[in-house]
Image (cartoon, rainbow, N blue to C red):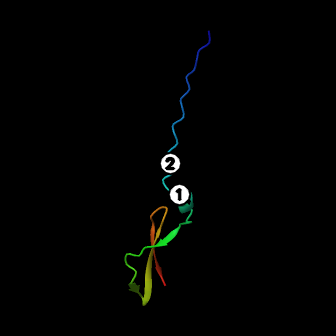
Amino acid sequence: MSKILEFKRPAPKKPARQSALCRNNHHKWKVVKDNQFDTRQGKLVTVEQCERCGKRRNVLR
C-alpha cells in the first residue's frame, strides 16, 4: 500500500491594510471643516483628509 501525504491547507487571506490607490499616492482628499480659518503666510490654510486611509495634509490657498 502506498503512503498517503497530508497537505497543509492554505491560510485564509488577510484583508489589505490600506487601499492600493493610497499606497501609490492616489488619495481621495476631502476638506476637513473643523478649523477653516487658519492663516499662514497671509494665505488661507485648508486641511484635507483622505477618505480611505485617513492621512491629512495642509494646503495653502
Q: Secondary structure at mark 1?
A: loop
| Residue 15, numbered circle | 2
Q: Secondary structure at mark 2?
A: loop
- The x, y position of residue 9, in whole percent, is 54, 31
On the rendered structure, is 49 left or right of 4? left
* Label 2 – label 1 distance at C-alpha: 10 Å
Q: Residues within 10 Å of mark 1 (few under 14, many from 20)?
A: few
Q: Is residue 8 left or right of residue 1?
A: left
Q: Which mark is on residue 10?
A: none
Q: Position of residue 55 (x, y in %)?
A: 45, 66
Residue farthest to the top, as pictured: 1
- Quarter assignment of residue 42: bottom left
Q: Is residue 21 above or below residue 3?
A: below
Residue, x 55% and y 22% (percent of image)?
6
Of residues 20 and 4, the one nearer the viewer is: 20
Q: Residue at x 40, y 86 (%)?
A: 40
Q: Residues within 10 Å of mark 2 (few under 14, many from 20)?
A: few
Give the x, y percent position of residue 8.
53, 29
Q: Report the side of 6 relative to 58 (left or right).
A: right
> Which residue in the protein does label 1 denote?
19
Say which amino acid is labelled 2: Pro
**Who's the residue at 57% across and 62% down the image?**
24
